Amino acid sequence: MQGNEACVEGALYVGCKFFAGYPITPATEITERMAWRMHEMGGVSIQLEDEIASIAAIIGASWTGTKAMTATSGPGFSLMQENLGYACMTETPIVIVNVQRGGPSTGQPTKASQGDVMQTRWGSHGDYETIVLAPNSVQEMFDLTIEAFNLSEKYRVPTIVLSDADIGHMRGKFTVSEDIKFIDRKYCTKHVEHNAFICDEGLVPEFPKFGQGHRVHITGLTHDVSGYPKTTDPEIHAKLVSRLVKKIRNHSNEISRTEILNPKADTILVTYGSPSNSVFEVLSENHNIGLFRLITLWPFPETEMKQIAKTAKHILVLEMNLGQIYWEVERIARQAGCQKVELFSKIGGEIHKPDEIIKRLKNEVL
Amino acid sequence: MKFFDLYRKDRWPHMFCPGCGIGTAMNCFFRAFAESRLNQDKTVFVSGIGCSGRIPSYILADSLHTTHGRPIAFAGGIKLANPELKVVVFTGDGDLGAIGGNHFINGCRRNIDLTVICINNYIYGMTGGQVSTTTPFGYYTSTTPYGNKEYPFDLSEVAVAAGANYVTRWTTYHVKSLTKSIKKALVKDGFSFVEIVSQCPTQFGRRNDMISARQVFEWLKKNSVLHKKAHTLVEDHLDLNLMGKITVGEFVERNREAYTKVIGVRK
Amino acid sequence: MVTVINSDYCKGCNLCVVTCPVKVYKEGDKPSSRGYFVPKIVNVEKCMDYKRKKGEKKKCELCVLVCPDQAISWSNE
């Protein structure tokens, strides 16, 4: 099965009942497979007029208490940015799959890239936090799609599965583990007309589903706990936006996931997504090299990174862009005491080959 | 049902300018809604950005105030995910005719069961009176200081051509007919479109020698002509809309099956 | 049944003056507490007598429908 198809199966497995999409290479297989598989599962899958409408429709669907998803690639993801911010502001759980391709603009439709890493984090205007997961195999396309739904439901935040053309079109098999957990958002049990956005220390308010008589007003404007627009009060805005950011940052240790091998090695390769497959090959022959693979890109696993950087002498970041996650790694590693943090970037659509990585390490290390 | 059973009394008086036609549209909508005996707890009100976008924040029901131009897309998602809900969209001429034009024509074509109420005041009111896609030819706005040199959109005719199930247009002067039409639109299956031509004395009137709400209101009254009679009145210019006048009435009534029924959404 | 204008809601647009078929309302000359010129009700008996159709004792309610600020209502005094 293809990575994109595994992603569909993951979504359906976790109970996604609404999909809206627009064809775009290399994410089209998701929209195609959804069209027939969703029908079998008794949900709705629809192809809309553009990506803006797609993300709008899934936000609408999510407010009726339905798990909803859309899938796209770079150009479509750029179009979605405004409504991504809207979903953050209104705390709507949605899942967006971004199968990255070469950019900017139309770029390389059929080639892989990791150029959208910062866009998932800073693409929409204003301060906000999202959760971003980076799968590196067909198995993880399945697993992380499920994980994305769970996290978005738990924290009421849009969650992005940041795949790329290589993972999306990679063929392989996946196994369905028996201990997969499903998390559903907490629904309001009481009538919340004027208290739709009241929450406890967890910072995530309960969800007032539409059609239950809650009579809530949901707006993208700055709002107070009642949901009514209060756009001119600086305190209300500061309180709301800091809560939206804190509800993710305060839980970043629970959310973040990494894969670490040989943590005490002098040389650590930092990677995520498709280049990590080459790194595994390098590691199988060079046991003195360590691996730090990011499964959660945002919130960035800062604690784990610090731990690694304390003992590492050389950190090499492999990315299929001209340096995006590198700056985050460099900032944290330097603080923790590792001064040699370097970037090995490769763009154009091909992943770093194992011998290229070894050559690069030899030039620098040996 | 009393007026404040449907509206949020704690938010009154509302934010709209003195003489704004949105208040009138809300009255007519309330009458129609009360008479059609719909359940407000099973109705969702969706709106975009602009003056018209603020209407749902006054309605005592589940309401979603969305991004600029996209309410029809959001509403479609709600309706498809839960077909038991009645979905009403409030939008304006800038929201629907300009930034949301694509969603509008495709919404009409797709025929999802929505009631779309567009308050067309010929101008961008909330941002301070800029030209809109429906501003009549030659009229003044803050971005057309030498008069508008573009011909306007006729939203209702666009909806007819795009395949909406029910299309009607009235001005805020025609309150009785408007109420009747909204009622019809609310119970109609499929995509129904109600265009309400409304006065904006603050932005549109002020720049076009109609200083008071009264003057714009009377201008609407003077310039509107029944759609049925319009064909004999066609003038060779398109300054107000395709007919050169504000044609009012019911434009089309079709019985195409609603999208939700065609695909057989289960819940 | 008497017509009442709620001066807390009225913004003095005078659309009721234009709309009323029997000229019940007249433009106001004194500002309300909110600074708007609320119209005066001058010919309330005309409204009482006005019938929309012959034999039908229903108010036309055009003013109630047109009033953009929901200020006009009926009271049973």
Image: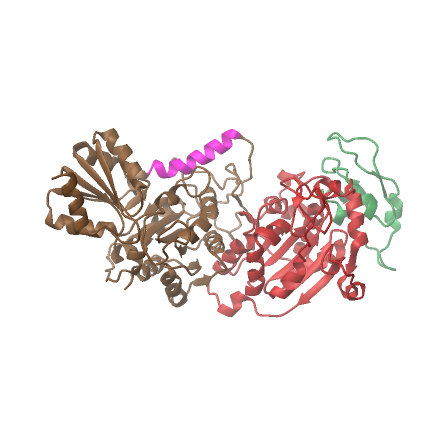
Q: How many marks?
A: 0
Residue A280 seen anywhere in this rendered image of the structure: no
Chain coloured green in the rendered structure = C
- Residue B226's spot in the image, x, y percent? 78, 61
- Depth check, front residue: A334 or A262: A334
- Depth check, front residue: A44 or A83: A83
Q: Where, by quadrant of the figure, is residue B210 drawn?
A: top right
Residue A259 vs residue C27: left or right? left
Is residue B219 inside the magenta stretch? no
Q: Eyeballing the image, is A194 above or below A180?
A: above
- Residue B95's spot in the image, x, y percent? 60, 50
Which colour style is shown? by chain
Residue A48 seen anywhere in this rendered image of the structure: yes
Q: Which residues are magenta?
A: A234-251
- Residue B218's spot in the image, x, y percent? 81, 48
Chain coloured brown in the rendered structure = A
Chain coloured red in the rendered structure = B
Measuring 38% from the left and 45% from the top, which residue is drawn there?
A120
Measuring 50% from the left and 29% from the top, which residue is drawn there?
A235
Is residue A246 inside the magenta stretch? yes
Measuring 76% from the left and 54% from the top, which residue is drawn there?
B174
The quarter of the rendered structure image containing the N terminus of chain A is bottom left
